[in-house]
Amino acid sequence: MNFRRLLFLGHRWLGIVLCLFMALWFVSGVVMMYVGYPKLTGAERLAALPPLPGAACCLSAADAVHRLPAGFDVRGLRLTTIAGEPYYVASSGKNRFAAVHGAEGQILTTVDDELAHRSAAAYAPGARIVGSERLSEDAWTHSRALDGHRPLIRVAFDDPTLKYLYVSGSTGEVVRDVSLTESRWNWAGAWLHWLYPLRGGAVDAWWTEIVIYTSLLSCVLAASGLTVGLLRWRRQPYRHGSHSPYRTGWLRWHHWLGLGFGVLTLTWIVSGLMSMNPWQLFDSGAPRPAEARWQAASPALAAAPKQVIDCFRQDGLTPTELAWLPVGDELLIQARTAAGTRLLRDPASCTPFAQLSPARLQQLGSATMPGTEVLAAHWQTDYDWHYYVREAHTMGGHQDKPLPVLQLRFDDAAGTWIYLDPASGRIVQRLDDRLRIKRWLFALLHSWDWLPLLERRPLWDGLLIVASLGGLAISVSGAVLGWRRLHRQNK
């Protein structure tokens, strides 16, 4: 069997197996342009919180830390409102959380249905709760970011806009919301696009490999189809007057659609594969920037919350949440609202400020990369090719991308760049050589993340929808041809 014959047969049988998968990817991709996988953004969470009660609140942050379980390595601390009551929420790394009642001081050991209902009712006042269920994971909670909150309590609503709220089994906070629109459209959107029907069942352990190798075979299908299409196209027309050998019907349409949209289809499948970071292609192995250490002896912990809240109120900001942030060798207090934030070093002096200086930020950034030198520092006030924001419902839309930021470029082997937020001192984005390549191979080719398009939404929408319809037409015509081939062989 010669190479050409093998190429034709390989394309045919891969198409029989995969064309319906690809058709579903194109349909679900268009849905995802407008309805994303459920998530709770930081802005949504803060908008649902009431102002912290200054007069009735609370034991000091230092007292709250002392009540945490033995061995709890504090990395961050917040004073927030859960189920209408003040709570300190402490974090240790990414996946361990604990809550301490802000007024009474007892640690939260059990999140029962009653607390979950009160927490959900406080988040969505006026919405009618119809039941709740304790679960580890379901269709809307596959995200690994929720691992520290499992088991979750899913609270169901009878409401024209809200379907579910998910309450943390560790802290009692609402950690995810699912609107009625999301619960309906996601079955044809992200849930289908990411092959989530395979999550949570017997093949859950192999989900990543299934997605990677299905995508890889789809790349082979698209590439072989392009090759076959070019081989069958003639510069000089065939006897019937066409450059395609196929006179009429599905074969002719499939050939011309493949020539017209085949390259786009191939780039989408390849870039979708890249989103999975197959075989750790984008892991440089470079050390991650070092985190600032928790300052247990800081005077910011000893201050009474009433004093801190009153200080911010005098500055014109009524906090809905306070956060104690390790920033370099100090601990800062950040007042948070949905509208903005303020910082405070020493509650006794009561001098809130909006942001850290560029010089202080550069000092902090340099300390996170010991043994390296800063090659360039840039105070960035506009979005650009590498640092930009997406719509909240999109896959990366939950990531906070404030402006301005300080961009620092280092001389390490991986070519690390970091972006620091002056309102908190935290690193909001890190890039290295491989992640910058991923930005091309995934974000650009798959989502068409290019500012001139993103800033002109009707143009971006139109181009993606037309290209998606082209890919869908290729896939559907291929599926019809595959079905006809199987039907003919079964006769």
Image (cartoon, helix red, strand yellow):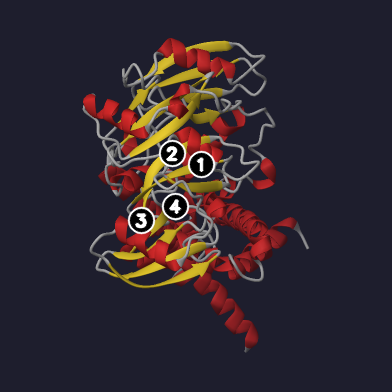
- The kind of residue on which mark 4 rests is Gly
- The kind of residue on which mark 1 rests is Ala
Mark 3 is surrounded, within 10 Å at the Cα level, by few (under 14), some (14 to 19) or many (20 or more) other residues, namely many
Q: Quadrant of the N terminus?
A: bottom right
- The kind of residue on which mark 3 rests is Ala
User: Splitting the image into 4 quarters, where does residue 11 fall?
Assistant: bottom right
Q: Which mark is residue 78?
A: 2
User: Which residue is rendered at x = 40% and y = 20% of the image?
Assistant: 345
Residue sitting at the far right = 1
User: Which residue is rendered at x = 50% and y = 53% of the image?
Assistant: 108
Residue labelled with disc 1: 90
User: Splitting the image into 4 quarters, where does residue 454 fall?
Assistant: top left
Horizontal side of residue 484 vs 489, given as left or right: left
Q: Position of residue 323 (x, y in %)?
A: 42, 34
- The kind of residue on which mark 2 rests is Arg
Q: CA distance from mark 3 to mark 2?
A: 15 Å
Of label 2 and label 1, which has the lower sequence position? 2
Residue labelled with disc 4: 260
Mark 2 secondary-structure assignment? strand
Q: CA distance from mark 2 to mark 4?
A: 55 Å
Mark 2 is surrounded, within 10 Å at the Cα level, by few (under 14), some (14 to 19) or many (20 or more) other residues, namely many
- Contact between marks 3 and 4 (CB within 8 A): the answer is no
Q: Position of residue 294 (x, y in %)?
A: 56, 28
Residue labelled with disc 3: 83
Q: CA distance from mark 3 to mark 1?
A: 17 Å
